[in-house]
Image (tube, rainbow, N blue to C red):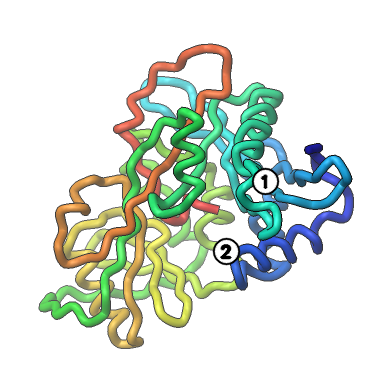
Amino acid sequence: MNWKLNPEGIKEQYLNCLNECFGHWGDSQLYEWVFYRECGLVKPDLFLLNTSDDDLMAGSALTYRKLAIPGSDPISTGIMTGSWTLPNARGKGCFTEIISYSKKLVLNHKYNFLTAYVTEQNASFRRLRDFGSLLIPTYYIIVDNDLLLINHKTIKEIDINADSIRKCFQLREQNLKNVIHYDYNLCEFESQFIKRSGTKVRIFKIDNEYLITEENNHTVRILWSSSYSVVMIQVLLNWAKLYNKNVFFMSTDSTWKENKDVKIIPGYFTVINSSLREIDIDWNNINIQYGDKM
């Protein structure tokens, strides 16, 4: 096996492979949003795994960001992004090779951690677990639109402009200052949560709480919210039901798994220490939301 790191003219081939492996992964615009943006650190790395005869087997990417740590300096991380293995190369250990190579690249940048998002049902989870990853539980939550709710609070859509974006940014900074979270400046926050590719983004206000959503034909996804109270979810769902849509979000709050009114897809934020020193971090004290994902 051999690697090709950031080869010229990779876009069309890589995008075709993503769509072959995942089915309608996305278009050129989404590709550029995921792989061309910088978010405070170096540009993303893309790499291909070939056989010794130069036949394509698999590919992956690393995007780079900082995690804010309470009482300490931010730490730099690589995030495994858009990993795929072609059908005829599966079962040959490609993803394990991708993990090893990704860890090497993160170390070459002198960054601290290699991270990834996986659901428990995904085979990638088992490979990352077997590689010795720290497994931080995440919960992908679906609230069906047939759930009967009675809640008389009102939801108001807010114009997306400099003031409303700054308000959301400031609330996020205030709410997350005592937990581990991704460290964005205002421009990066707007790029990550507002200027997304190919989806309808909205900002809502419920009482004094704000949330940012995006939509597809069947689902309203919460990208970020200043609160995930049951009341907030009820009010948003009542709005979504007008359009026959479900509500979906991701949480690192374990109390959601006790809620019998929602569907839970268990998953993990996985962490591999790629540095040469131990770093004492309370990973249970973390807040990651769906919009943090690439």
Question: On screen, 93 above or below 74?
Answer: below
Asked if one can make out residue 40 in the rendered structure from this viewpoint, the answer is no
**Precedes in sequence: disc 2 or disc 1:** 1
- The secondary structure type at the circle numbered 1 is strand
Q: Amino acid at mark 2?
A: Arg
| Cα–Cα span, label 2 and label 1 | 19 Å
Residue 27 placement, left or right of 67: right
Q: Is residue 143 left or right of residue 277?
A: left
Q: Give the amino acid at mark 1.
A: Ala
User: Where in the figure is residue 116, as x and y percent of width and height?
Assistant: 51, 42
Q: Is residue 208 above or below residue 277?
A: below
User: What is the x, y in percent for residue 285?
Assistant: 30, 33
The residue pinned by badge 1 equals 61
Task: Name the residue: 58% across, 43% down.
Answer: 80
In the rendered structure, the answer to whether residue 187 lies left or right of residue 289 reads: right
- Label 2, on which residue? 196
Task: Provide the secondary structure element on which disc 2 rests.
Answer: loop
- Contact, mark 2 vs mark 1 (Cβ under 8 Å): no
- Measuring 35% from the left and 81% from the top, which residue is drawn there? 245
